Amino acid sequence: QKEVEQDPGPLSVPEGAIVSLNCTYSNSAFQYFMWYRQYSRKGPELLMYTYSSGNKEDGRFTAQVDKSSKYISLFIRDSQPSDSATYLCAMTLNTNAGKSTFGDGTTLTVKP
Amino acid sequence: DAGVTQSPTHLIKTRGQHVTLRCSPISGHKSVSWYQQVLGQGPQFIFQYYEKEERGRGNFPDRFSARQFPNYSSELNVNALLLGDSALYLCASRPSGGEQFFGPGTRLTVL
């Protein structure tokens, strides 16, 4: 069983919809949680970075962490066609983001 | 400022051959990490180097090796290539205590 499990998708939504992306993890030692966006044939791009349980908001994006349930989510409000990409969750044991453990990604398509 | 650069963009090798992939970090970043991303999967950690020293190694065989140079650029070497080594190889750099920034990757195909 993988340390990080991510809803595989694919996910297709109409423009303007609220999108929910989710990951669960088994290692309770994970402390830092990240969400990356990856366009086809490109490297991942960091969207959100959070440490504590609770919510963190940045524009249309909200990252939610529930350490007690070992569950993290990314919400995208007012989704746009440009949000169409693969979304990867990642986590680390400490502040060293250079040794991240990733989920397998959820591919999102936002239709105009 | 230039981002993380990787070369080559893609290459094709045959089984048993050796390959060297190169990465130049963002200026000022001393930490470089390498990840392997197989199609349909997330990146898997291979190595991390900081100040030319190995700071971590993922669950990869000894055929994989890496090094970091005084200018903080890095090479990933893979010997005795197998078909299963076909993947996108990602390099990421980070400043001390900061987030990591990924390069565009090198797509390796092993025939």
Image (cartoon, coloured by chain):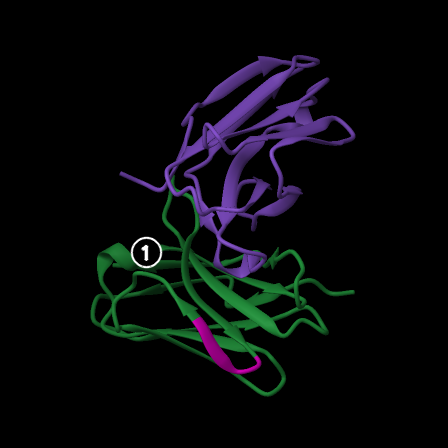
Residue B35 placement, left or right of A12: left
| SS category of the residue bearing label 1 | loop
Q: Quadrant of the N terminus of chain A?
A: top left
Chain holding disc 1: B
- Using the image, determine if residue A6 lies above or below residue B22: above
Output the letter for the chain in purple.
Answer: A
Q: Farthest bottom residue? A: B70
Residue B24 placement, left or right of B42: right
Q: Which residue range is magenta in the image?
A: B51-55
- Give the image location of residue B31, x and y in percent: 58, 71
Q: Toward the viewer: A30 or A61?
A: A30
Determine if the magenta segment contains residue B52.
yes
Determine if the magenta segment contains residue A8.
no
Give the residue drawn at x 44%, y 47%: A29
Give the residue number, with chain letter if any, for mark 1.
Answer: B86
Residue type at mark 1?
Ser
Q: Quadrant of the C terminus of chain A?
A: top right
Residue B17 placement, left or right of B55: left
Give the residue drawn at x 66%, y 12%: A17
Q: Colour of chain B?
A: green
